[in-house]
Every structure is written in C-alpha cells, then in structure tokens.
Amino acid sequence: MNNLELKKIANEVRKGIVTAVHSAKAGHPGGSLSAADIYTYLYFEEMNIDPKDPKMESRDRFVLSKGHTAPGLYSTLANRGYFPVEDLTTLRKLGSYLQGHPSMQYIPGVDMSSGSLGQGISAAVGMALGAKMDQKDIRVYTLLGDGEIEEGQVWEAAMFAGHRKLDNLVVIVDNNGLQIDGPVDEVCSPYPIDKKFEAFNFHVINVDAHDFDALRAAFKEARETKGMPTAIIAHSLKGKGVSFMEGSCGWHGKAPNDEEYAVAMADLEKISEELNKEEA
C-alpha cells in the first residue's frame, strides 16, 4: 500500500475517532488522533492479520497499553473490516461492545483487554515470550503513552523483555509530549526515553509518527533486529488533524460539542479533499 493510500485511511480513522467520541459525549480524542497513523500502519501494512479470521493462530498480536485511546483502535479495526464503521457511534453506550477500554471478550480483533496504565506492556511481553517458547513465528506489538511510561510496571516489563532477548516484541511509545495534567516533562519527566530503553537492552528507533516512509523504515529495522526487543519512540502531535485540538492537553479526555464536532469534521474533510487532489 502506498503512502497516499495510508494517509487517506488514517484520515478516515481520525474521522471515526471524532465521530465516536462526539457520539459518546466522553472519551479521549487527543491521544487517539496522535496515534492514528501508527494504528493505520500497523493494521493496514505491518501486521500479519485477517479480519475474516480474527482468531487466526498465526496472527501477529497487538496490545493497547494506553487503553484510554480505544477510539483510535476501534476506528482502525472498523476501517480494516473487523466490524461495521457505523458501530463507532455506540462508543461507551450502555449495551455496546465498544466500551471505554477494549475488551477481548467482545470485540473482534482485540487480542488483550486494556487495564490500568502500565499493564499492557506486561501482557505483550508475556505473549512474546510464549511465542518464543512455542517456537511460533509471531510478532507482538504494544502501544504506550509517554505519560504512561511514568508507571514503574513499564520498566519491570522492559527489564524482563531485554533480559529474555525478545526480538519478536516491538514497544511503541506515542511521544506527543502531553498527558492529562500537562506536558510530560513538567508532570514527571520520562526523558530521555530512548536512553532508558537502551539501558534495558532494547534496540531503539526515534521516528516521526506522522511520516509513513519513516514508519515503514522503522518497522523494517525492527523486523531485522535480532537478539533484542525494539522500542520505537514515535514523536507525534496530540490531536493531530483537528485544528483546535492540536498540541492541547485540554483535549486529552474531553468530547467535542456539536459546534466543535462540525469544525473538527470540516478540518478532516479538507484534508480528504487535499489528498484526493494529490491523487489526481
């Protein structure tokens, strides 16, 4: 799939995020939008998956560690064909299978339910070790927030993964620089993120989270790295694609009202038009 196709899909994923959170009147748009290109690359290009057979034994696994950005994962899964895009408007509604955090019991394509911040990477490390023990050619990917990595459990998991040389594991940090209470470097700085993962025996790649060429090169490098897990530090823009959400921690966990929703969708529609012109 070429970059233009990926950009168009990522923009549809962003539309789904905004629509879902607006419909729910709750949710986390900022970090979902910053990770939309990462989600898109993983599910449309990188991972060995089959929406028609979500439980395929040989599939690669994805664990959403920053579980509050479920709207991003849901929109990606819907656009990839795991369930109808129309269902995104049921986000967080009573009786909906699309709850505030992903549940593996109810959602096709979800390999692990998300819990408290920091837990997802531990589950991913276990999956990667299990695949090694069973001698299965399965890769495991997990997405963390840069605020999330202030959790101690993250580094316990990293220590174990590095020690066990889990080269089938890719840890992706969505480094948008903002968490619920403000800039990460002011709340409890996790910097330097790359040096920390290196200290835990990871191969580390810094990448522009919104550049598909850079993402393609990073995931290729991760595949080619043997004898150690890889950490991809994805430098991103919180709220990417929506003018008034970009770079604002205020949109970490807030839903747009009707007027804001209209502006957000107009922003994303404008991007669609520009991408269509590029194609022509």
Image: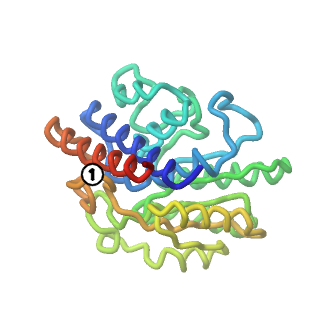
Residue at 37%, 45% in the rendered image? 14
Q: What is the total number of numbered labels drawn onto the structure image?
A: 1
What amino acid is at disc 1?
Val
Q: Nearer the viewer, residue 262 or 191?
A: 262
Residue that lies at the very extreme toward the left in this rendered image: 259
**In this rendering, would 263 be left or right of 276?**
left
Across and down, in percent, residue 112 comes to: 58, 40
Instruction: Establish if 55 lies above or below 175.
Output: above
Q: Quadrant of residue 22?
A: top left
Q: Quadrant of residue 261?
A: top left
Using residue 160 as the reference point, say whether residue 116 is left or right of it: left
* Residue 143 coordinates in the image, percent (x, y): 52, 54
Mark 1: few/some/many CA within 10 Å (<14, 14-19, 20+): many
The foreground one among 201 and 141 is: 141
- Can you name the residue that lies furthest to the right here? 135
Q: Which residue is mark 1?
A: 242
Q: Position of residue 149 (x, y in %)?
A: 47, 64
Residue lying at 53% horizontally and 29% vertically, measured from the top left: 107
Residue for point 78% across, 69% down: 227
In the picture, measured across the screen, residue 255 lies left or right of residue 135, that is left
Image location (x, y in percent) of residue 5? 51, 48
| SS assignment at label 1 | loop
Image height check: is 82 above or below 155?
above
Q: Residue furthest top?
A: 95
What residue sits 49% from the left and 35% below the top?
Answer: 79
Question: What is the basis of the colouring in this image?
Answer: rainbow
